[in-house]
Image (spheres, rainbow, N blue to C red):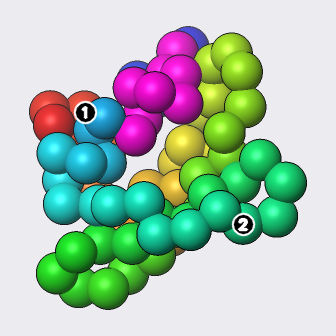
Amino acid sequence: MGRLSGFKYRGIVKKLRRLGWAFDRQAAGSHEIWRHTESGRKVTVPNHPGDMPEGTLRSILREGQIDVDKFLNA
């Protein structure tokens, strides 16, 4: 179990909001597009039940250029 395991959708979204991200629009199926309010960067976040796989969360952070430590401390 790594540092990014055990996060659920709601916890991830709460941290993204604290870091300046806002819901932009619904994407295909159960995925959502979130956009950073200042830089305009965007990430795709799946809205699935249960814990988000660690690799998926790492991919979201990499796509949004979010530092892992910054995310964990938000």
CA gap, disc 2 and disc 1:
26 Å
Left or right of residue 39: residue 48: right
In the image, what residue occupies the spot 72% across and 66% down? 27
Task: From the top left corner, tell me how far across and down residue 70 is, in percent.
Answer: 18, 46
Q: Secondary structure at mark 1?
A: helix
Return the residue nearer the eye: 52 or 25.
25
Height in image: 69 above or below 25?
above
Q: Residue at x 31, y 48 (%)?
A: 16
Q: Is residue 62 magenta?
A: no
- Would you say residue 69 is visible in this rendering? no
Q: Which residues are magenta?
A: 6-13
Label 2 sits on a secondary structure element that is loop
Q: Residues within 10 Å of mark 1 (few under 14, many from 20)?
A: few
Kind of residue at badge 2: Ala
Labels in figure, total: 2
Residue plotted at (42% across, 35% down)? 12
